[in-house]
Amino acid sequence: MLWNSRFKENMHEDAFEFSKSISFDINLLNEDIEQNIAHCKMLNTLGIIRNDELEEIITGLNRLPEIFTNDENRIISEYEDIHTAIEKELK
């Protein structure tokens, strides 16, 4: 859960389920990946990430649609939104 580190206890399961948007915003997967790639290219242009890091990130991001398609039920049940899912699955 994205905000879980701010609390001493886990969010109640009902509250977590109520706050989830991933079943809707999973439809934004490709657009979110494109946005992440654009952001990483900007960071590379500014010298914040190296060329090899950029390529590794882009390769990982480009693998995500297949992972999400093959394991959509797990993704939807495990994450609260598409941004968190991308971040966690990319690691």
Image (cartoon, helix red, strand yellow):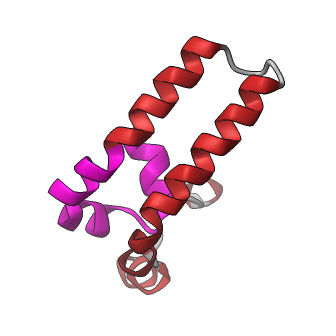
Is 21 drawn above or below residue 35 in the view shown?
A: below
Q: What type of secondary structure mainly makes up the magenta span?
A: helix
Can see residue 1? Answer: no
- The foreground one among 55 and 88 is 55
Question: Dividing the image into 4 quarters, which one contains the C terminus?
Answer: top left
Name which residue lies at 57% across and 18% down.
53
Name which residue lies at 43% across and 45% down.
88
Q: Is residue 6 left or right of residue 75?
A: right
Span colored in magenta? 64-91
Q: Position of residue 24 (x, y in %)?
A: 41, 81
Is 42 drawn above or below residue 9 in the view shown?
A: above
| 45 is within the stretch colored magenta | no
Name which residue lies at 31% across and 52% down.
65
Q: Position of residue 14 (x, y in %)?
A: 38, 84
Instruction: Give residue 48's quadrant in the image.
Output: top right
Q: Position of residue 89 (x, y in %)?
A: 37, 44
Name which residue lies at 49% across and 81% down.
19
Q: Position of residue 83 (x, y in %)?
A: 52, 58
